Image: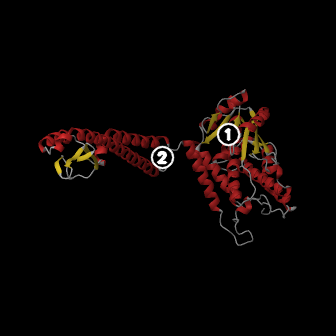
Amino acid sequence: MNHLAPRQGLFAVILLASFCLHLLVLALSSEKQQYDYRTNKGEKIVEQLSKEALVAVSNQDRISLSVLANRYQLDSDVARLTISGADKTALVQTGVAQNDMGQVIEKPIIQNNQQVGQVAITMKAVSNGEVLASQWLFILGSAVLHIFLWFIYRYNARPTQEQLLQIGEKVQQRVALARFGVPTANVSQNVPQDDKDSEKQTPPSNERPQATDNKTGEKAGFSIQSYLQQQQAKNPSTSQNIATTPTETADNLPKNLHQQTMATEYELALQIRFYDEFKLLERLAPEVAQPYLHLCEQLLKRACDSLLGQRQSVLNQAVKSVTLKQLPYFDKHGAVVHLTGKSEEVTLASVLLAKLILILNQVVYEKHRELSRFALPMSVGVSTTQQFADVQHLMQSHAKEDGLLLLFPKNLLTLLNKSVQVKHINNPISIAEREMVRYEGLSQVFMKELIGKRDDILTSTERYQMSQPI
């Protein structure tokens, strides 16, 4: 489906205004040029005619004056030509347009320091129609050029598939914000009620975290701990008996996820870092920083539990063999998540979990900025445990706001071809940079599932208990 370029009407108005300005400038410049040309031409005719008509004017010879005047009145630029005597009486008056109003040029006829007559010539006025008719080629070329620019804009300004995906994510984020943006009647009337369960960040400087935060944090992580214990006690093959709903059939999953997976297991590491260009977190007061880090940790645990839990959804079935090695925790340097599982599933799970964390943080960050509270964007790097140090080094120079970097062996990277879009960086200067790729997009099925999980995490209040609003 071809999408139209944005604001085509506005661009068309700009092009039309540009074309009209071109015509206006052309008319003014051509008119000035024609005026100067006819002025110089009229002065030369009057100068020459005053010399030739000297004898005929002295003798009042109208026949000779008529012959002289007819030689100049044939010029297309001359509207009227008049030769008068000493008493201002017209001796000869001729011209092809004697009633036209135009520039009048006069010159007296002098003989022996005495005026014996006068020559007056009226040049034709410059017509805009005449100017435009003489410049038709320029006008046509300008019109063709503006039409050509119009088609270039319509073709090149169409949004790409990557931009459409980004727009879709932003729209979903706005919808999620609007969904729980109903104000309450309590003290914090500007804070939506549902946001209080998902935005446990920077408290006022006069409020300190209470002891109940640790208890509620344990409740939020209990489901993840239980899940890990169940995964260690159960045989991974038992999870294959979980039925799927009609809308979550194998047709919606990449084909390679339903093939017999290899017995080799991999351990991948997700490095979650704050995108803190100005080192704000280091200068933040502890009573503000700790609740914010606690919120980030709880959201991370929710994301792990939602993606790796035993649920009957497309995403959970795609990564059913993946387990969380240990519970993650957040500090000022971020967090690290270790995943283990079969190669196809753990590779996909690492990307899905990283993207889920990023879109969760995008909503929380935008809402906190709207409420003038402290928050930071994030960036994530994913690699094998052997390449952990390489990704940590690459993130220092290549990380972007809400960006995802992947550093996988070639055999793992090829497993993502059908579900994840990636792009190599330009002008790599090391082996690690040549092997590293940036996340560019996700399949539509997986992206819709991630957005649904994000909304469930942010809006659920029964399964998770958060600390007091901050």
Residue 111 figure quarter = top left
Q: Looking at the image, is mark 2 or mark 1 earlier in the sequence?
A: 2
Which sits in the foreground, 142 or 291? 142
Give how far across and how far down residue 407 sits, in percent: 71, 34
Neighbourhood count class around disc 1 (C-alpha, 10 Å): few under 14, some 14–19, many 20 upward: many
Name the residue tied to disc 2.
5
- Side of 10 where 320 appears, left or right: right
Contact check, label 2 and label 1, Cβ < 8 Å = no
- Asked whether the viewer can see residue 428, the reply is yes
- Side of 32 where 372 appears, left or right: right
Q: Nearer the viewer, mark 2 or mark 1?
A: 2
Neighbourhood count class around disc 2 (C-alpha, 10 Å): few under 14, some 14–19, many 20 upward: some
The image's mark for residue 348 is: 1
Q: Amino acid at mark 2?
A: Ala
Give how far across and how far down residue 405 sits, in percent: 70, 38
- Asked whether the viewer can see residue 462, the reply is no
The image's mark for residue 84 is: none
Q: Amino acid at mark 1?
A: Leu
Label 2 – label 1 distance at C-alpha: 34 Å
Quadrant of the rendering where the C terminus is positioned: bottom right
Q: Which residue is located at x 22 percent, y 41 percent?
A: 76
Which residue in the rendered view is the most extreme toward the front? 112
